[in-house]
Amino acid sequence: MADVQLAEVKKIYPGGFTAIHGVSFVVPDGGFCVLVGPSGCGKSTLLRMIAGLETITSGDIRIGERVVNQLEPTERDIAMVFQNYALYPHMSVYDNMAYGLRNLKTPKSEIESRVAEAAQILELDTALLSRKPRQLSGGQRQRVAMGRAIVRKPKVFLFDEPLSNLDAKLRVQMRIEIRRLQRRLQTTTIYVTHDQVEAMTLADMLVVLNAGRTEQIGAPLELYERPATLFVAGFLGSPPMNFLKGTLESPATVRLDDGTAIACEGAYAAVPRGARVVAGVRPERAIVRPLGEGLAKGLAKGLAMKVDLIEELGVGRLVHGQLAGAPMTVAIGPDQQLPASETIGISIPADAVHLFDAESRKRL
């Protein structure tokens, strides 16, 4: 096994388009790193550069002690699982899993042993090994693709959106299996997805990408609880963070654009009074209260939210509406009663407010 190090890695295509702008991070030996971001942010390009399927314009990629910039994919000791599984349709499951080992001139007895071990780990029934890929379900095909990677016993696993072709229920199941598998094998893993829920639940380490640049790197909860930018705050979380525009009136008060005020808790003494800010509030941190009710110290008073829609989720409800001229979503429990009126009262604890500079979009 090995760690993976990227140092100022860039990718510039002919014509001058820069897909990756000097990305640097280190995935520790045995770590599970998820590259996450919207479509077109460069995450698959970055993964293909690590795999050797895309050339590097500048910078270095190390796997273990070796700089692999000039090495062919077969020389990097990695195994990649693709979105479309990339199975050979004319081969049996066994032959698909054994193919790479045969190319490496691995002894037949060892091939048999490795395939049997991988099949057991992935709970692939012995009867499935003789079938062709077309005779398998989507989940079984994904297991075969993973098995083909496992038998090689690589230093690094690379996953390129492997679950995007599966239905929602199967995605959850396979997500659990991939995490369990990685913990069992302790193989360094880099995983690409645009699904932020998938990213949060799988990763030891998140790399959030936006337009070929890293927005923030760290543990999932760290990024969720202390997003460094408005992009990260809005991208991580389902439903996403609410954003309310306003002005910093004092170190502990934000005056929203509709004239109401909310309290904030943080080291904002150095921020100029009157600075334009964006106050971020997670849906689960806002509190629904009757309009006009006296509120405890540290909670915003007099916030009235116009309700547009209530989503019933079974485990809870999402109340969507408008607050201070901006869209607002509040998450509440399944048993919490809501007023029958179209307008409800909202309070926001001071420690629930994240402040961002409106111009730089960075956390204050």
Image: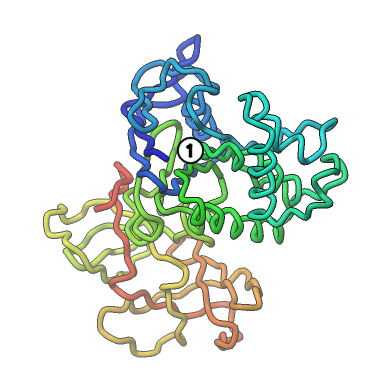
Looking at numbered disc 1 in the image, what kind of residue is underneath it? Answer: Val
Residue 84 shows in the view:
no
Q: Quadrant of residue 188?
A: top left
Quick one: 110 or 140, which is closer to the camera?
110
Tally of numbered discs? 1
Horizontal and vertical percent for residue 165? 72, 45
- Identify the residue at image location x=15%, y=52%: 272
Horizontal and vertical percent for residue 42? 50, 31
Quick one: 32 or 205, which is closer to the camera?
32
Quarter of the rendering occupied by the N terminus = top left
> In the displayed structure, would residue 66 be above or below residue 209?
above
Q: Is residue 18 left or right of residue 335?
A: left
Q: Residues within 10 Å of mark 1 (few under 14, many from 20)?
A: many
Outermost residue, left side: 270
Question: Which secondary structure lies at badge 1?
Answer: strand
Quick one: 46 or 51, which is closer to the camera?
51
Outermost residue, top side: 15
- Identify the residue at image location x=63%, y=70%: 309
Residue 153 shows in the view:
yes
Q: Is residue 199 left or right of residue 101?
A: left
Quickly name the residue at label 1.
Answer: 156
- Identify the residue at image location x=61%, y=78%: 315
Quick one: 132 or 234, which is closer to the camera?
132
Which color scheme is applied?
rainbow
Horizontal and vertical percent for residue 200? 48, 56
> In the displayed structure, would residue 272 be above or below residue 46?
below
> In the displayed structure, would residue 126 be above or below residue 109?
below
Horizontal and vertical percent for residue 246? 32, 58
- Identify the residue at image location x=16%, y=64%: 251
Q: Is residue 291 left or right of residue 84?
A: left
